[in-house]
Image: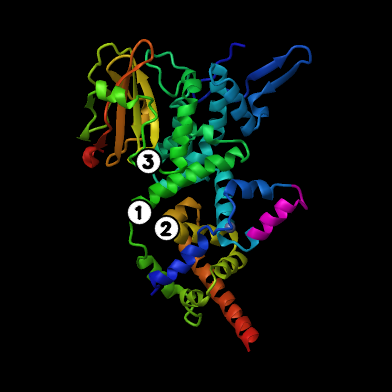
Amino acid sequence: MADPMQNEKLKSALGPAEGCPPLEQLVRALEASEGDAWRKAAEDHTATCSHCRGELALMREFVEASPRPDEARNVNWIAGRLAKQRVFRPSRQRLSFFFGARAWAAAACLVLVAAGAFYLPRGPGLPSPAGAGEGVMRSQALELVAPLGDIPQKPAEFRWRAVPGAVRYQVRLMEVDRSEIWRGEATDAFLSIPAPVLALMPPGRTLLWEGSAWDQSGKALGTSGTRSFRVNLDSR
Amino acid sequence: MTTRYSGVDAPRRFLVAESTSTATIETMEDLSDEELVVRYRQDADSPAGERYINELFRRYHTRVATWCYRLAGDRDSAADHAQEIFLKAYTHLNSFRGDAKFSTWIYMIARNHCYNEFRSRAARPAHTSEDIVLTDLVDDRAENVEEALARMESAESVRALLAQTLDDTEHKVMTLHYGEELTLDAVTRMLGLTNASGAKAYIVSARRKLSVALRRWNTRQQRETS
Ligand SMILES: [Zn+2]
């Protein structure tokens, strides 16, 4: 039978080597005009690199993916759901979600932080980009109410205790490595959770969240600690 | 312009700019993915900006849905994964710098998301009975591929040998199974392989080819050293 240690040789040959360019660069180079030195280098590399050949072939598989007749019904259903549940609609709600376009400009720098978190896993000790200074954190804590710990079903909203003088609250939802996956704002002590965000809470997945409170002048009044929750596995 | 873009059945073509002097009409479809990102950034604060981003993502709905459906194998969890991918794409859109193609960028997000999810979900021991069956299927006369590969000292040589020996489908299957540790079932679904034994058949053929290539390589090495 196959020895796992020997299969490691295959695994490492199919993984990236030091000389492998990022896939984005490789794709660009291969599309450069014929005779271009950049393209030639990319072609030479791909001819002798099983990793890059595999990655390129898989990327084409994705780019050219179209459902077979036996898949079409289900794929169309999924695509329809994606189109319906777009989170990028102009928000006319009282609550202004992070995904509302209006919040985009203000949040752009914060997204940059989140993007960094996506590509470079962050340690749990890194500071929150929410903007609340440490002194503020000492002065007044925001108490989170729900969801906390193991919960029987997906939560409809985030809830916390109102902070005197606060006119705006912000909630951050994070993966366990603290990379942010969603951010929302509220004027009261709760925030409804939109459907696409609920989809990020499958049973058994632990997520973190934290909140912060702001006054009329934009001064941070307090922030909560980070708390975790998880929808029970038997809630399906 | 009064056309509003909302819902699944909204028309794909609608005006984004109109010049009365030249009577040229530019539609969303005329814009490349990368141009849509630029327009979105310019108008991020308005409903127009949202139309750009919705059009951009709409172009990938079917591809991401197909990809997720093949990997997940069931409609509901595929839909959840597809949503997560678009949410990640939106959240990290600022990291798209335009020096890559948007299709490559969103593919990377889908790829990282799905491989992580399905690798952890499989949570199988690294090598299972699948491998045993595979080894049994390999031609008895052929040298054991792993043993022969283990004798190749340089990783570069193994990499080049694989690149020169296997075709695209074999590369995809080997990368997903050995590189990304997806189960053969998942690989079969993902690549839409419709042959009777799916990914397994491609692994068997890849290993046969490798076995032959390794024998040639060994012969050449012996000739060179003698
Ligand atoms: Zn490479």
* Distance Cα–Cα, label 3 vs label 2: 20 Å
- Disc number placed over residue B77 in the picture, else none: 3
> Which stretch did the figure color magenta?
A33-45
Reading the image, the residue beneath label 1 is B122
- Mark 3, chain letter? B
Q: Tell me the quarter of the image containing the N terminus of chain A.
A: bottom left
- Kindly identify the amino acid type of the residue bearing the numbered disc 1: Ala
Sooner in the amino-acid sequence: mark 1 or mark 2 = 1
Q: Name the residue rendered at 67%, 49% in the picture.
A: A29
Q: Is mark 3 on a helix, strand or loop?
A: helix
- Disc number placed over residue B42 in the picture, else none: none
Q: Which of B90 and B156 is in front in this view?
A: B156
* Distance Cα–Cα, label 1 vs label 2: 9 Å
Q: Nearer the viewer, residue A38 or A86?
A: A38
Q: Check chain identity for marks 3 and 2: say if they share one.
A: yes
B102 part of magenta stretch:
no
- Kindly identify the amino acid type of the residue bearing the numbered disc 3: Ser
Q: Where in the figure is residue B59, as x and y percent of width and height? A: 57, 33
Report the colour scheme: rainbow
Reading the image, the residue beneath label 2 is B181
> What is the crowding at mark 2: few (fewer than 14 residues within 10 Å), some, or many (at least 20)?
many
Q: Tell me the quarter of the image containing the C terminus of chain A.
A: top left
Ligand 1 rendered quadrant: bottom right
Sooner in the amino-acid sequence: mark 3 or mark 2 = 3
Q: Name the residue rendered at 44%, 16% in the picture.
A: A91
Q: Where in the figure is residue A231, as x and y percent of width and height? A: 25, 36
Q: Is mark 1 on a helix, strand or loop?
A: helix
Above or below for A169 versus B193? above
- Relative to A142, A129 lies left or right: right
Q: Are marks 1 and 2 in contact (CB under 8 Å)?
A: yes
